[in-house]
Image (tube, rainbow, N blue to C red):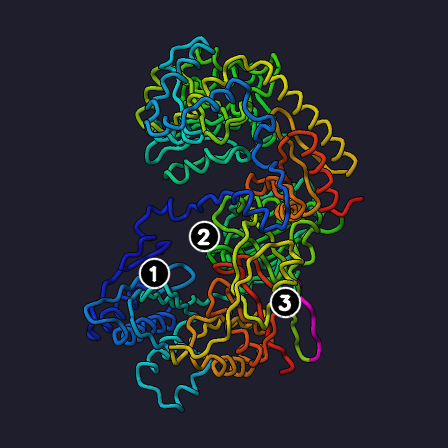
Amino acid sequence: MIRLFDRAPDYVRRFERYVPSRPDPELMRQYGVSHLYRLNNNENALGPPPAAREAIAAFAPGRAALYPSGDAYDLRQALAARFGKSPEQFLAGNGSCEVISAIIRAFCGPGDAIVTADKTFAVYEWVAKFSGIEARLVPLVRQALDPDAMLAAVTENAKIVFVCNPNNPTGSWWDKAALERFLVRLGGRALVVLDEAYREFLDDPDFPDSMKIMERHDNLLVFRTFSKMYGLAGLRVGYLCGSEEAVDMVRRTHIAYSVNALGQVAAAAALENDADHIAATRAMVEDAGRFLRGVFDAMGLEHLGGAGNFIMVRTPVSDTLLYRRLMMKGVMARTMTGFRYPNWIRVSLAREEAMEAFASALRGALDVP
Amino acid sequence: MPGELSVLMEIPKDAAFACPAANVAQTLAERSGFDRRESYRFQLTVEEFILCLIGVIQEGDGLRVILTGKRHLLRAAFAFRAAELSLGGLNSAVRDVVRSAGEPPRDLGLLLAAASADRYNLEHQGGDRFRIVAEVDRRYPEPPPVHAPQNLQPPYRIVRHPDAARLTQAAALAVNAYPAWQSPGCFQTPEKFADLADAGEIACVLALDAAEQTAGLLTWSPCSDQALYFSGPFLFTSGTDRDDVARLLLDGFLEAVAREPHAIVLSVRATADLLPGYFEPLGFLQSCAGTVCEQRPVVFRHLREDAGMAAWCSPRIEDFLRRSYAGLAMTRDILPVEEPGGAARRESLLGATLDRWRDLAELRPFLDGQDMAANLTAHVKAIREKGINTILYYMDLSRPWDAALAGDLIRSGFSPKLVLPYGGQSDMVVWQHDQTV
């Protein structure tokens, strides 16, 4: 008589599954459009860097029959060489989301908590909740993570502090001094996980060099991704870096073989001679940001953006309605209600053609000439 | 008094266990602090449902009963398997028809069980599995007079979990300041509102001014697996501050529910203080008292991006549906259903919720049957006789048999008023009975 539903733990029953968007052809059919600009996931419109493209093209189909390296051996060698560290300090995952799960499994048990912001990347909160771990959410102050309030939230059972730096979706970030002060005042009472998914979009000397800082603070873990700057979102590769001891602990709860062979090869290649690709991407993002800020200003719309290849704009209608209206014009943006920014949308900063299409669709959707 | 008491019983298919189970219900009611009258009604509900369901469940099966005592209600949930289910007696509004037709005692027992409870609900859980939940409410005292706060001053802030005294005061203020139809029924007895909030069955954001005076309130609670129903914003400020407080309440509400497992929020009783841009208008429902009729707006918003879906649709309302979806910029695959050629089940089953406070009756189909049109007509007649003017019917477009009932509804005097996206398992058409019929 016991229903399957009732067999799941309460914290799983209460959790709502994530519903990803449908494939482009299906969306185009639904909305009756012949082209779709995807500006919802902050992908890099320039695609992968040249070396990664070559690696993908050279990947022999026959290799698909073989298991990949179970611990992304070559990719970790490449990362170690890039950052001057030991390969044992790196752990590769199927996107950084998988690594977030592994960290929470490694360091949190029943009755424990994580601390993060209320308006930030949702996956820390989601993983904690569906794992039965308390997610302690600290409100942003002036659209930025509040170090004092986050410190105050770290009580005895708080095991991890997740800091999205730069923060998705506000683009705000802690500089070197802010991070250092935070770590000193925390005094090793909890692990600090820096999510640097958008780090490569910044070229500011005040941005913290987390790879160096972790040498002084062994409770600091950093993860980054190949999905954003490196244009490999479809291959799902992210990585974690920290002290050997911390990474060893996370490795125990991490599923081996989770990164596919093509992803490993492409990610390792992406690190080679990437300066031109990074410079070109930053230039595209800067141009797009300047263009959209002008559009929003002309329409009298409040906007918010900083580091990263995205910008948020406050809309005079509900974001979920605007999403549908934009879709009917072949443009996909991200609604921000789920980020606790009702009536805001987030738009990826991409090539000129896509930005102009978005601007035109926005004017049409809001009935602005 | 404990916050919540619960008893679980697995009862074999043997009527001898009905009386002991009723004794357990009585003890639970007493231990939960309910008075004799409510305790007796709960006892009767449990005993009669068990006696009836024992006759319905399959040989070798049992009945799983969960009794729960909360501060504001007693609840009995009965889970069972039944291959041939006939629960015509649960059609509470047609009791006279049942009696004159000389139905078997099993239905009369069900009728008694349904009548003893303040409300009941039947869930079809797939295959031959069903669950009936029946509830008996606590009686609350009339609220004492309340005085509106004076000279409210910014800055305003919101609180998510106010204490019971603050909740009671805010509900009483809302009742004083707004028409009855805009308030949740529990505002009539504000102590109940505080108990519901304590039990987690209703949530709210409350606004305070600089001197910690109550400045506003907005409440919500789930009305289906996918939808939250909100009431408000109720504002106790004046002048230009009203928009600021409304914005605080609306933002606080949406931020609170943004990552909860619901797809939409909606209201048919939003106040005129709702700010533009936060919600989408779906249409209007008409409410008439005497010769005066007014149009009451229905608003909603998605909490997530619309993924599109399929909707079953009778040809009788296809134009209405397509027009509604076009107005909402919402894509749907319309799947045609024909009118039922002859339902397998003889007796249909409708659930009815009556709310005299808001002059509202709501009908939901639980089971299709050959007598659906007659059953609808009987319900409407009985509801009208109770003096309730607004009668709504909810059609879930995820169920082809439900969508196919459009003809029965039109013949019974209902018309489709609006589409409520994700209002049920999928989209829902809200029908209203024409008050001139």
Q: Chain of mark 2?
A: B
Residue B25, given in percent of the width and then of the height, sits at: 30, 67
> Do circles 1 and 3 both sit on a common chain?
yes
| Label 3 Cα crowd, 10 Å radius (few <14 / some 14-19 / many 20+) | some
Q: Which mark is residue A50?
A: none
Q: Which residue is mark 3?
A: B320
Can residue A63 be seen here? yes
| Label 1 Cα crowd, 10 Å radius (few <14 / some 14-19 / many 20+) | many
Position of B191 with respect to A352 (left or right) is left
For the residue pair A121 and A354, the one nearer the viewer reads as: A354
Q: CA distance from mark 1 to mark 3?
A: 43 Å
> Do circles 2 and 3 both sit on a common chain?
yes
Q: Give the amino acid type for the residue marked by disc 3 in the picture.
A: Phe
> Do circles 1 and 2 both sit on a common chain?
yes
Residue range in magenta is B291-297
For the residue pair B303 and B93, the one nearer the viewer reads as: B303
Q: Is residue A129 above or below residue B164?
A: above
For the residue pair B340 and B16, the one nearer the viewer reads as: B340
User: Is label 2 or label 3 in front?
Assistant: 3
The number of numbered discs placed on residues in the rendered structure image is: 3
Q: Which mark is residue B68?
A: 1
* Local SS, label 2: loop
Q: CA distance from mark 2 to mark 3?
A: 38 Å
* Residue drawn at point x = 70 percent, y = 51 percent: B276
* Local SS, label 3: helix
Q: Which residue is mark 2?
A: B200
Is residue B229 in the magenta section? no
